[in-house]
């Protein structure tokens, strides 16, 4: 595997992780507001 291919794979992996974390935080925020607006500590 060339360094260019490895770098692209790394960027894709980081992008997916960031996307998943963003969605998880958004859903957690929505669920928290629905439950009754309790404060979350991340």
Image (tube, rainbow, N blue to C red):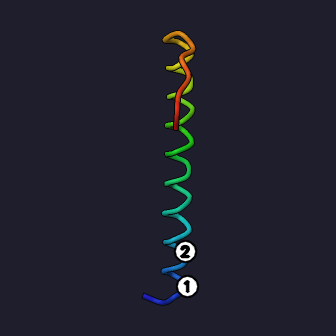
Say which of 24 and 37 sits in front.
Answer: 37
The tag on residue 41 is none
Residue 36 x, y percent position in the rendering = 53, 9
Mark 1, residue position: 4
Above or below 10: residue 42 = above
Say which of 5 and 20 sits in front.
Answer: 20
* SS category of the residue bearing label 2: helix
Residue at image x 53%, y 38%?
23
Quarter of the view holding residue 22: top right
Above or below 6: residue 37 = above
Residue 29 x, y percent position in the rendering = 56, 26
Residue at image x 53%, y 12%?
34
Q: Quadrant of the N terminus?
A: bottom left
Residue at image x 56%, y 58%?
15
Residue 11 x, y percent position in the rendering = 56, 68
Residue farthest to the top, as pictured: 36
How many marks the image carries: the answer is 2
Above or below 39: residue 13 = below
Residue 2 x, y percent position in the rendering = 48, 90
Q: Residues within 10 Å of mark 2 (few under 14, many from 20)?
A: few
The tag on residue 8 is 2
* SS category of the residue bearing label 1: helix
Say which of 39 and 32 sits in front.
Answer: 39
Marks 1 and 2, how far apart at CA: 6 Å
Q: Residues within 10 Å of mark 1 (few under 14, many from 20)?
A: few
Q: Report if the CB atoms under discs 1 and 2 are less than 8 Å apart.
A: yes
């Amino acid at each position: 595997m060339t360094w260019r291919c490895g770098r692209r794979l790394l960027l894709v992996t980081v992008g997916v992780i960031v996307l998943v974390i963003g969605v998880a935080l958004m859903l957690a925020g929505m669920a928290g507001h629905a439950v009754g607006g309790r404060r979350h500590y991340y």
